[in-house]
Amino acid sequence: MTYFQSEMIYPAIATACALVGSVTDVKSRRVPNIVTIPSFVFGLVLHLVLGGWKQMLLSLAAGMICGLVFLVFYLAGGMGAGDVKLIAAVGCIAGMSHIVYILSLTAIAGGVMALGLALVRGRLQETFLNVGELLTHHRRKGLQPHPDLNLKNARTLRLPYALAIAGGCILTLYIQVAT
């Protein structure tokens, strides 16, 4: 296997994992452990087989970094635990060399999707005001969830964030192919 092929396989498989997570997230508004846990383990085994122990440990670190970044949003009440586990699995599969792209492009994809959702639902102005309210709240209270603007509030706009994770993976794969 050439270097190009080995570097392409990781974001390709991470994309497949994120797409499976997206389907379950859209259908049931959950990303179940049956998707995330085997994917995380598969990422570790994949890196062990293709790159040895050092690469497997870097894969583990990549998964933990991605999971910790999303854990912040979970603790703040703005993301589900399944999304945190999915990004950890995707990071583990993609490996350390791809997580900056995946995290950055997932954030961009999520932002674009969130703006589109707010626009389609006629709540764009309300959404911008809520973002300001959230920033003020978290500046004062830290990661404590906002009493009203969180996932437990049925009126809150909800984006199945696995879609954004899949979008970030697809864009990462595209960049790998294009370069």
Image: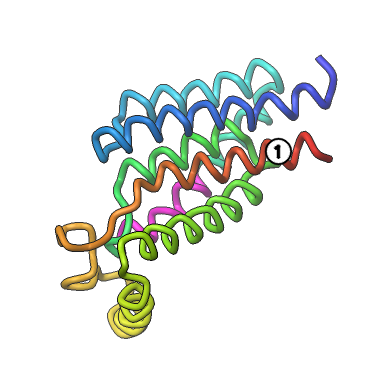
Residue ID at (34%, 52%): 159
Snapshot colouring: rainbow
The total of numbered circles placed on residues is 1
State the predominant SS element of the stretch in magenta: helix
Q: Which residue is mark 1?
A: 174
Above/below status of 112 relative to 128: above
Residue 155 occupies which quadrant of the picture? Answer: bottom left
Q: Secondary structure at mark 1?
A: helix
Seen from the viewer's position, the closer of residues 1 and 111 is: 111
Q: Is residue 4 left or right of residue 170?
A: right
Q: Is residue 31 left or right of residue 48?
A: left
Above/below status of 39 relative to 111: above
Residue ID at (30%, 76%): 126
Residue span colored magenta: 64-75
Residue ID at (32%, 37%): 25
Residue 111 placed where, x, y %?
Answer: 48, 61
Q: Is residue 20 left or right of residue 155?
A: right
Above/below status of 66 relative to 153: above
Residue 169 occupies which quadrant of the picture? Answer: top right
**Amino acid under label 1?**
Tyr
Image quarter (top left, top right, bottom left or bottom right) of the N terminus: top right
Magenta stretch encompasses residue 69: yes
Residue 36 placed where, x, y %?
Answer: 39, 30
**How many C-alpha atoms fall within 10 Å of the one at disc 1: few (<14), some, or many (≥20)?**
some
